[in-house]
Amino acid sequence: MARPAKDAPVLLRLDGITKRFGALTANDSVCLDLRQGEILALLGENGAGKTTLMNILFGHYVADEGAVLVSRDGAELAQLEPGSPHAALDAGIGMVHQHFTLAENLSVLDNILLGTEKLSALKSARAPARRKLADLMTRSGLTVGLDMRVSQLSVGEKQRVEILKALYRDARVLVLDEPTAVLTPQESDTLFAILKKLAAAGLGIVFISHKLAEVMAASHRIAVLRGGAKVADLPTSQCDQRQLAELMVGHEVSETVRGAGTPGDTLFVLTGVSAGESRESIRDVNLELKSGEILGIAGVSGNGQTMLARVISGLETPFAGSMRLGDRALTHANARTMIDAGLARIPEDRHRDGIVGAMTVSENLAIEAIRKPESQRFGLLRFAAMRDKAKALIDAYDIRCQGEDSPARLLSGGNIQKIVLARTLEGEPKVVLAAQPSRGLDVGATSEVYRRLLDARARGAGVLLISEDLDELMRLSDRIAVIHRGHLSAAEPTETLDRGTLGLRMAGHTMEAAE
Amino acid sequence: MIRFEPRGPVAVSRMIGVSVTAALAALVLAAIPMLFAGLSVFDAYGLMVKGAWGSMFAFTEMLTRAAPLILTGLAAAVAFRAKLWNIGAEGQLYAGALAAVAIGTGLISGPSFVLIPAVILAGALAGGLVMLVPTLLKTRLGVDEVVTTLLLNFVILLFVQMMLEGPMQDPMGMGWPQSEPILDEAALPKLMDRMRIHWGLIIALAASLGVYFLLKRTVWGFEIRAVGENASAARHAGIPVTATFIRVGLLSGALAGLAGVGEVAGLKGYLTADLSPGFGYSGIVVAMLAGLSPIGVVFAALFIASIFVGADSMSRATGVSNYLADLIVAISLLCVLVSGLFLRFRIRLSTSSPAQETAK
C-alpha cells in the first residue's frame, strides 16, 4: 500500500506517556507520532495498554507522566489539555469506541448532531447539516440513511454513523478501538476500504487491534505494545505475521495444528430446538455432533449463540424440540443433569458464569462435583480431599495462583479459564461445549485452550465450539455451521469452506446465493 | 483528589479491625448530641459501662438482652450471606413467640423434657414458615423480598394484637391484651438464682456455633456461599439455587422465631404486643457490624446489648432520654456501611490536581 510522504506533517504526538494503576504500569513512557494521511495500527494483546493509551489521548484518563501534542489546522504541535474529552474533540480528535455510544431511539441525523449545537440556538440548523453530511458521505463512501432510527441499523451501519459523527465534527485524527470485533469479514473489508479513502484525503487514523491479518492488510505502519511499553514501530511493508506475533507475545509462538480426525458415532443431537423470545433466540435448530470431532459454530455476535449455549448448558428449557446425548433424552434438563450426563460446559462469560470470585481456587475446582462422594460425606465437606485434588489440577493445568486457598477473583482471565477447563475436562466428558473459549485471552492461554480442546477430540469426545473468531474456527473445527438470526445452517467440512463463503453466510445470505 | 484503589484479599484481622473501628466511630459521633443535651460525655459513657458491665446484675441483664440479638443477628447474617434480604426478623420473632405461647399455655401437657423442646420447635417452625412465604414469592415470581419481609412485620404484629385481644386473651388478665402465662413445665429454666438470665442465651450461643459449622463445613453451607457470592455461576455449576434459597429462608426465619421463644418462654412468661423493642431490626445492625460472620454476631450483639442496657441505666441517672441508644445503634450501622468501602478499597489522597501532575 502506498505510504504517505515521509515529510507529511505530524498531526499527533504522544510524548513519553506513562500511566500507572496502583502497582500496575498500564503505559510505560510510550512515544508515538501520527502523520497526516497515515493509517497506524496499534497492535497488542489484551492488557497490553492499547485502550488505556487511547483513553489518555481522548482525555478519559490523565497520564501520570508525558504529554499529548496536537497540531491544529496545520499549526505547530501544541499540548492538549489533559483529562478533558472536550479539549480532544475541539482539537479534532474523533474516537469510535468498541461499544457504540449512540442513542438507539433517535434518528441517525439526531445522533450526529447531538452535542454539536448550542443550547441557546432557537432552531436547529438541519438543512446545512444535511448538506455537509451528504458531501461527507459521497466523498468517503460512508452511506447511511440519515432519517433511519439507529435501533433499525445493522452493527456495520452503526459503526458508520460513529465515524460520520467524528467526521462531522471535523476530526483530523480518527481513533478506532477494535473496529472489526463486531463485523463480518466482508463488512471489515468495506471498512478498511473507507479508511484508506479517508487517509488519502488527509486524515490521520489509528486503529487498535489484536488480529494480525487485518493489521497487515490495512495499515501503513504498525506499533506494537507489550506490557504497556512500545516494543516496535515499523512500516507494514517490513513486517510479517510471525514476527508480529512474537513481538506481541515476547517469545516464539507455536501454531496449533489440527491433525486428521477420526470421527466416530453420533454422540449429541439437537432436533428442532427453539428457545427464547427476543432477538437473542434460536429457532428450529438441528445439530449432530460425532465423537472425535470439533464442530464449529460461526456467527456474528448476537445471532443466538448465547441462547444456544444456555440451552445446551441446561440453563434454559427450550419450548420445542429435543436434545439427546447418547441414548439419554435431555429435553427438560437443568445444569445438574447436563453435568451428570457427561457434558462439559465452558461458559462464554467466565467471570459471570464460570467462577465464584470470592471463593477459593480449590472450592471453584470442586463446585461442579460438590455433591459427589469425592467432595463430601454425609453432607460434610472433605476439605483434605478437595485440597489434594485442587493441588493436582493446579499442577496439571498450570494454573498460576498463590495456592489453592487464594480467592479465585485474584487470578487473571487466562488462569480463570484454566480453572474452568480443569474442572470440566478432568472428568473426561463425552461432549464439550466451548462458548467463546479464547475471548479476551492472551496468545499463551489461547493456545492452551486449543490444546485442551484438541486433546478432548483425540480421546473421542465431541466438541462443540461456538466462536466469533473465524481463524479460530477454521483452525480447530472439522466441520462448521453458521448461525444467523437464530437459525443454524447445516454443517459442512472445513476444507470445503473459505472465509468469504462463511462471511456471506454470517451476514445472512443463503447457501445458494453464496455459491 | 481522592482516589480509590481496589484491595486484594481481605484478612480476618482487617475485617475485625473495621468492625471495631466502626463501633468506636459511632461512640465518638454520638458524643455530639450528648454535648447538645448538656451531658459530660465521659460521665455519660462511664454510666453506660457501669450500667451494662458494672455489677453481676447489670452484666446478666446485658446478657439477657444479648440473647435475642444474637439470634436475630444470625437470622440476618445467614440470609444476607445468600443475598436473601430478610428484613422481617421482627415479624418472625413474634410468630415464634405466638407459636410458643399457643403450645406452652396448655394445648399439650407433659413433663418439661417434652414441653420445652415442643415449645422451641413450634417457635422455630413458625418463624421459618413465615419466612417461607416471601422466599417462595421471590423464587417463583421474582417478588422483591425486601418489600415483602418488611411489610409482613406489620401484618404479623397486627395479627398478634388481634389474637391477644381475642381468642388468646388471658381471661384472668383484667382486660389487658396479653396471653395466658406459659406453664412452668414449658418455661426455659433460669441460669442463675434471682437473676433474669435464662437458657435462651445458651440456645443463642449454640445456634451461632451451629451456623458457623453449617456455613464452613457442610455442602449446604458451600451452596449458600456460592449462591450468595455469584448466583449465576452457582446455577451454571449445577447448584440448586431455588432449593438453597428455600433452605436459607427457613433457617433464617427459624432463628428469628427462636428469639421470640426465648423472650416469652425464658423471660416474660406471657406474650404482649410490646414483647420486642425492635430486636428484629437491631439484628440487621448486629449482622452488618459482625461482617455477616456467625461468630462475630455474638460479639456485635454484646456491644449492641451493652448500648441498650447501659443507656437505660444512664438515662435513669441523668434524665436524658434512652433514645440515645437507638441513635448510637443507628450511627454504628452507618459507620459499618461506610467502612465497607475501606475494606474493598485503599483510599489515597493526592494533593496535586491532575493538571499540575502532567504539567511537571
Image (cartoon, coloured by chain):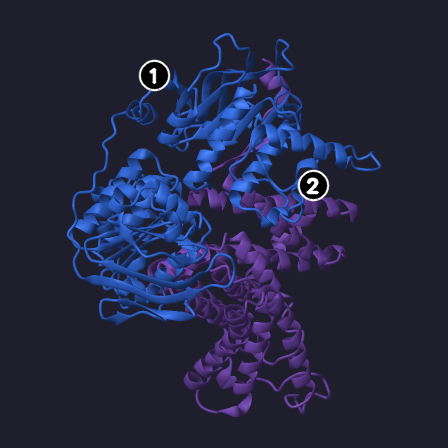
For the residues beneath circles 1 and 2, the answer to whether they share a chain is yes
What shade does chain A have?
blue
What shade does chain B have?
purple
Residue A112 in the image: above or below residue A205: below
Of the numbered discs 1 and 2, the one sitting upstream in the chain is: 2
Q: To which residue does mark 1 refer? A: A238
SS class, disc 2? helix
Position of residue A28 measured from the top left corner of the image (x, y, whole percent): 44, 20
Residue A61 location, quadrant: top right
Identify which amino acid the numbered label 2 is placed on.
Asp
Q: How far apart are marks 1 and 2 (CA)?
A: 44 Å
Residue A153 showing in the rendered view:
yes
**Res. A110 mark:** 2
Number of dots carrying numbers:
2
Q: Residues within 10 Å of mark 1 (few under 14, many from 20)?
A: few
Horizontally, residue A393 falls left or right of residue B205, namely left
Position of residue A245 measured from the top left corner of the image (x, y, whole percent): 31, 27
